[in-house]
Image: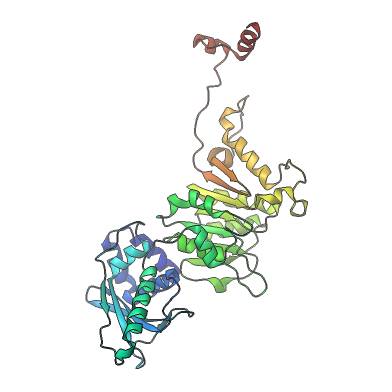
């Protein structure tokens, strides 16, 4: 089983009966499962603040078996997995979880009260140098807090995560995360699949800050990024960088067939108006019912160098023009005269278009609300005691 497949199974175990986790252990063993969980914990951990290095043992048990991972923490350095048998290792703290409890902490419902689900062995051995006891106590306390910060699905808001990972979706040229918070909140507890077009990065910078932000925010999500350039060096558990051209509809459909369907697609790619339309037409059919398609940077609809229209009114072939068409499609049932041809996919499945400054959220579902029956003519309205619009105007003029 690949690491990606194992991670996907574990996200589902977070809300499944404990027997599902036990079955997974039978299939692959405890060690690879713990490796995925430790990787997840390290990704979620706050940066260490202890100035003195501290070694902590994270022990995960299942039945009679226990797997121990020793972590070294020190401010200004990434948390490292070290060899627990090294004579230089001095374990200051043991945090012990059962496998099912740790899985539920990481992938279970948010806002669940966690208490009494782990054992903490603090300073198991007397320090050799008691003159450093205060420093050892403080550093060990801080390191334990850092480790526990990673043993949870809870996360800061998207604004803070955007700044932490270096995304420009907040406090930069854009203020998008407040809108993302509003529209994404209902998806946070779900094992969603997210595709973001455009990974970012320039020169020697691989980019990917937004992908990391989504991975942290959606604690059960699988995150995919699409870029023209190979950025597979960004790959990690629950995050995969794909290579492709958003202007190539066939390639987009093949990608969606392999990695979709998606709950959320975000277009933060080239912002060329033609590319936005091509990507939407190719990928919207691969968004799950109840999902969202997001288009960022609508300002290029007004910029000719991106294929936009100068002036205050955009053309139909721009990104804003696409949104205007979708508003018409939502009201397909109200067309007069009633159309005879079958509905298009957007007429049938777009149920909401929410626009803000430079960003839009398109909801997918069943656009099945009916309208006034076509046979309701003036005679029918009169039978209901209503007056026709013409009669209403005549009555108004007579007053």
Q: Is 144 situated left or right of 162 in this image?
A: left
| Residue 250: percent from left, percent from top | 63, 56
Q: Is 40 situated left or right of 94 in this image?
A: right
Extreme residue in the left direction: 64
Q: Quadrant of the N terminus?
A: bottom left
Q: Residue at x 62, y 73 (%)?
A: 205
Q: Nearer the viewer, residue 316 or 179?
A: 179
| Residue 353: percent from left, percent from top | 57, 42
Q: Nearer the viewer, residue 388 or 209?
A: 209
Q: Residue at x 57, y 36 (%)?
A: 330
Q: Is residue 149 visible?
A: yes
Q: Looking at the image, what colour scheme do you see?
A: rainbow
User: Image quadrant of residue 79?
Assistant: bottom left
Residue 109 vertical position relative to residue 382 in the rendered view, above or below:
below
Count of picture labels:
0
Q: Nearer the viewer, residue 62 or 78?
A: 78
Extreme residue in the top direction: 398
| Residue 68: percent from left, percent from top | 31, 80
| Residue 180: percent from left, percent from top | 52, 52
Q: Is residue 282 visible?
A: no
Q: Quadrant of the C terminus?
A: top right
Q: Is 43 situated left or right of 347 in this image?
A: left
User: Image quadrant of residue 115?
Assistant: bottom left
Residue 150 vertical position relative to residue 349 in the rendered view, above or below:
below
């Amino acid at each position: 089983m690949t690491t990606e497949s194992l991670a996907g199974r574990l996200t589902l175990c977070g809300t499944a009966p404990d027997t599902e986790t036990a079955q997974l252990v039978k299939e692959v063993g405890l060690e690879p499962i713990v490796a995925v969980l430790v990787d997840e914990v390290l990704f979620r951990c706050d940066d260490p603040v202890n100035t003195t290095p501290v070694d902590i043992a994270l022990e995960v048990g299942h039945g009679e078996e226990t797997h121990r991972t020793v972590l070294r923490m020190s401010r200004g350095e990434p948390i490292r997995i070290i060899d627990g048998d090294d004579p230089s290792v001095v374990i200051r703290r043991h945090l012990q979880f059962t496998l099912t409890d740790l899985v539920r902490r990481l992938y279970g419902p948010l806002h669940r009260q966690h208490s009494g689900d782990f054992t903490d062995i603090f300073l198991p051995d007397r320090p050799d140098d008691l003159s450093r006891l205060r420093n050892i106590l403080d550093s060990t306390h801080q390191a334990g807090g850092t480790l526990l910060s990673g043993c949870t699905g809870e996360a800061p808001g998207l604004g803070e995560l955007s700044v932490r990972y270096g995304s420009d979706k907040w406090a930069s040229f854009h203020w998008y995360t407040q809108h993302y918070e509003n529209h994404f909140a209902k998806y946070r507890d779900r094992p969603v699949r997210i595709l973001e077009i455009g990974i970012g990065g320039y020169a020697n910078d691989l980019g990917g800050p937004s992908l990391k932000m989504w991975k942290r925010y959606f604690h059960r999500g699988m995150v995919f990024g699409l870029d023209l350039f190979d950025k597979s060096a960004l790959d990690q558990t629950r995050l995969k960088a794909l290579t492709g051209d958003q202007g190539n509809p066939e390639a987009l459909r093949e990608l969606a067939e392999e990695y979709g369907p998606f709950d959320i697609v975000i277009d933060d790619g080239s912002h060329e108006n033609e590319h936005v339309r091509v990507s939407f037409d190719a990928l919207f059919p691969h968004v799950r019912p109840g999902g969202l398609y997001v288009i960022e940077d609508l300002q290029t609809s007004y910029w000719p160098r991106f294929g936009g229209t100068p002036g205050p009114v955009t053309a139909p072939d721009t990104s804003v023009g696409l949104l205007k068409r979708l508003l018409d499609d939502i009201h397909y049932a109200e067309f007069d005269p009633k159309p005879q041809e079958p509905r298009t996919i957007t007429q049938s499945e777009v149920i909401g278009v929410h626009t803000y400054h430079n960003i839009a959220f398109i909801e997918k579902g069943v656009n099945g609300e009916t309208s006034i029956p076509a046979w309701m003519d003036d005679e029918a309205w009169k039978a209901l005691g209503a007056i026709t619009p013409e009669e209403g105007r005549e009555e108004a003029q007579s007053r």
